[in-house]
Image (cartoon, rainbow, N blue to C red):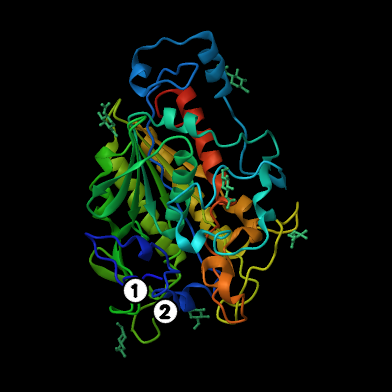
Amino acid sequence: MKSTKTTLKDDDVDYDSLSPFNKTLFPHTLHLLLPVALLPIAIVLLCLYFYPLPLTQSQPQPHQLHHVTLSPQVKEKHKAYNNSCDYFNGEWIHDKRGPLYNGTTCATIKEGQNCITNGRPNSTYLYWRWKPNQCNLPRFQPNTFLQLSLNKHIAFVGDSLARNQFESLLCMLSSVSKPKPVHHKGSHWWHFPSHNATLSLYWSPFFVQGQERSKSGPNYNTMYLDRVNQRWSKDMDRMDLIVLSFGNWFNVPSIYYENGLVLGCLNCSDLNYTDIGFYVPIRKALRTSLDAIIERRKGKGNNGIGVIVRTFSPSHFDGDWDKAGTCSKTEPYGNGEKKLEGMDGEIRKIEIEEVESAKVKANKFGGIRFELLDVTELSLLRPDGHPGPYMNHFLVANGVSNHVQNDCVHWCLPGPIDTWNEIFLEMMKKWEWEGQPRNED
Ligand SMILES: *[C@@H]1O[C@H](CO)[C@@H](O)[C@H](O)[C@H]1NC(C)=O
Ligand SMILES: *[C@@H]1O[C@H](CO)[C@@H](O)[C@H](O)[C@H]1NC(C)=O
Ligand SMILES: *[C@@H]1O[C@H](CO)[C@@H](O)[C@H](O)[C@H]1NC(C)=O
Ligand SMILES: *[C@@H]1O[C@H](CO)[C@@H](O)[C@H](O)[C@H]1NC(C)=O
Ligand SMILES: *[C@@H]1O[C@H](CO)[C@@H](O)[C@H](O)[C@H]1NC(C)=O
Ligand SMILES: *[C@@H]1O[C@H](CO)[C@@H](O)[C@H](O)[C@H]1NC(C)=O
């Protein structure tokens, strides 16, 4: 077992510290993080801008793509991209097919999410698929995703749930094309030479500037709600699509700044500031980020950008995290069995409202497209999809004891989080079909 760093330096992201479940971060982070149920909001801000790239019927070499005219088959394919399904309401149904990858075929799965390899005994949780009420959600097609990512840079920005989704995508794409890690200061880039496509991951759990609480530093977060985090925003001009996701790190004692002054705090009984909770700060941080994208990219014509905000990813602790809270269910919830409420619903609502508001602002300019990847409800129905005790490999040898930590926040890879990327791909197809990114009125 390798040791992990406890702090996150700006110029050197420790890949293992991207998760609040990091072994060293876990104890002091989680006891504050988990009580309210944990906020794995992965706001995926997918800035994806897709030129109407011509598609050929087969899986062509990328460099041919620019020069072919549409064949009848391709027109058929384009028609198939004219999908207006609501992918976010539906149910989980049995599916014999199973995932596109496993811990053997994909080398980049983080240990804590490699559930089967860690000894999870029952793989029935892998044999479900999401069935939207109005249509069928196609299985993930790695080649299509790569084709749509031709010469593009897709950036994931956020917290450890952003990374979780990023790694699901990386595993599925790796099943057809081998990516190469690319050194990039302060973030992780993978390049697919077959399609000159780049996927990147930026650690920025608030989106705005600030400092996460840490063992060696202060015991609270510091956030500057009106200043976007340069770590990712400095590269914005090189991104075609941004997937934003956050939330995990907000439900922790924090001090919030705005206009250089303290705006308030969260659970700061020892400090003389007003406790303003974390909903207002979440909204402000998101708004600051979306505004920054609009400000930077407005009116850039063909050099447009797509932005996807992935809504909050619910966690599933049966009890309190510190009282051996577990996620022991082994099957999805059925229709109507679980209602979206409380913090999960509230954060999702903020995200929806802020994306709507950003759409209106961006409409004036063109060249920027905002969308929601609303995974909250479909994820809420999958209490069986978390690592639980199988976040640690040693369990294989020692068996599950009563006192083991459970991760009921992140998602097993493979697992239901792969569905997020299936829907993501359908969104990309739709954008492709519709041509230039734009906002709908
Ligand atoms: C796209 O699909 C919708 C509904 O499925 C249909 O009404 C519309 O005519 C289609 N548009 C084109 C250009 O095919
Ligand atoms: C992983 O998938 C490969 C290819 O589908 C298969 O041969 C292998 O047995 C699988 N490994 C596990 C541990 O399921
Ligand atoms: C590869 O993609 C990048 C964007 O990610 C683009 O700037 C570059 O021009 C592309 N290279 C080629 C040869 O098309
Ligand atoms: C904040 O404090 C209140 C009351 O002391 C407590 O109920 C709540 O769980 C705390 N929240 C966090 C995130 O620590
Ligand atoms: C807390 O702040 C208020 C108003 O800013 C001030 O009147 C009060 O003296 C402060 N209390 C402490 C203990 O610092
Ligand atoms: C695996 O889990 C499913 C669903 O809960 C259950 O029906 C099945 O009996 C379990 N299989 C084993 C071998 O434990």
Image x and y of residue 282, in percent: 42, 60
Crowding around mark 1 (Cα neighbors within 10 Å: few <14, some 14 to 19, many 20+) is many
How far apart in space, not on screen, are marks 1 and 2 (Cα)? Answer: 9 Å
Residue 374 visible in the snapshot: no
CB atoms of marks 1 and 2 within 8 Å: yes
Give SS at disc 1. Answer: loop
Which secondary structure lies at badge 2?
helix
Q: Is residue 425 left or right of residue 62?
A: right
Location of residue 238 in the rendering, given as x and y in whole percent from the top left corner: 26, 38
In the drawing, does residue 11 fall left or right of residue 73?
Answer: left
Identify whether 60 is placed above or below 188. Answer: above
Horizontal side of 288 relative to 403 (left or right) equals left
Which residue in the protein does label 2 denote? Answer: 28
- Which sits in the foreground, 14 or 254? 14
Is the shortest distance between ligand 4 and the CB of mark 1 under 8 Å?
Answer: no
Residue under the point 27% across and 56% down:
229
Q: Report the disc number at residue 81.
A: none
* Front position in the image: 98 or 299: 98
